[in-house]
Image: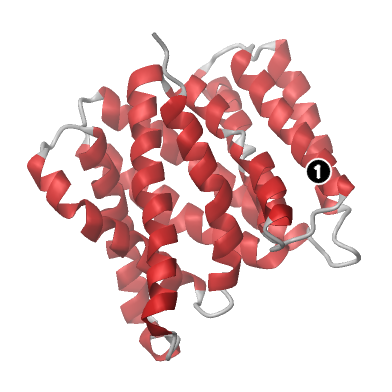
Amino acid sequence: MVNPAYALTAALIWAFSPIYYRGFLAKFDIPSFNLLRTATASLVLFLPAIYYWGDAGLGFAVLSGVVTLACGDSLFLFSVRETGASVAAPVVYTYVLMIQLAGVALGQVVPYANVVAAVMVVAGVYILSRGGGGKPRLKGIALAISAGVLWTIGQELIQASTNAGGNFIVVTFTRNAAAALALGAVFLLTRRGRTWPRGLGFGYYGFVLAVIVSDLVVGSILFVYSISTIGVALTVILTSLSPLLTQVFARALGKESPSPRDYAGGVLIVAALVIAVAF
């Protein structure tokens, strides 16, 4: 029996985290904050990963971590800082359609539904690009689309890792550890320690770490486990609800003020993603 609870819970978690990340990025630079994210997740997952340790599918997990978490998430964070979570989240989730269209490169026939979905995505992104009260959004949207391309590659690598027998906790740890090592090298080589924010206090760091753990540990474990049980296609459909929820929660929490145009663009994109994967 298909159990959608894992993917839906991940979608709910991922709807909230980008909203708070924009505030954190007012204090941290992006490579440093992404290092904090992935290093924290690695430390939390270290002992569980040791308990379940096995080397099946680790190569794919390492590649997924570098491509998705180190590179893709950094681009997504740049987009969140530029345009806000309520715009960046719907645009980056176009990776769901990208996964479907990637089959063309493998010689698969593109269903008519994917053509319809592609048109809807283009329309949705165009609508989002025209909002912003005069503030240019093209840079942030371009960053989100670039992140989506890397997420597309990364999600396929997750499925390859779990298909090779990788344990979902070990895969999640390995992805975060690989990303943390890559970002740590950038942090050291660029001497970003000098820009680390000072005087934030234990309470602030506690809140930051709670959001990070819910996102990269709880959300990621649920996502990887859902892929291993119900497959990447259905998992992606369910988690694609996340960007629309981000828009709703951003307004409800008073963090952002998406316009009716923004909601229209988000609804178009989410509907396109469901059509692309369901038909």
**Residue 238 at what x, y percent from top left?**
55, 27
Of residue 83 and residue 256, the one placed in the foreground of this image is 256
Q: Is residue 167 left or right of residue 116?
A: left
Whether residue 36 can be seen here: yes
Disc 1 crowd, CA 10 A, few/some/many (<14, 14-19, 20+): many
Question: What residue type is disc 1 on?
Answer: Tyr
What is the total number of numbered labels drawn onto the structure image? 1
Seen at 71% across and 48% down, the residue is 247
Is 5 located above or below residue 140 in the figure? above
Coloration mode: secondary structure
The quarter of the picture where the C terminus appears is: top right
Is 83 located above or below residue 114 in the figure? below
Which quarter of the picture shows residue 61?
A: top left
Q: Is residue 279 left or right of residue 180?
A: right
**Residue 187 at what x, y percent from top left?**
36, 76
The quarter of the picture where the N terminus appears is: top left
Seen at 52% across and 38% down, the residue is 11
Seen at 50% across and 71% down, the residue is 30
Which residue position holds label 1?
A: 263
Of residue 66 and residue 241, the one placed in the foreground of this image is 241
Is 267 located above or below residue 20 in the figure? above
**Residue 138 at what x, y percent from top left?**
78, 58
Of residue 119 and residue 266, the one placed in the foreground of this image is 266
Seen at 61% across and 58% down, the residue is 19
**Residue 194 at what x, y percent from top left?**
40, 91
For label 1, the SS is: helix
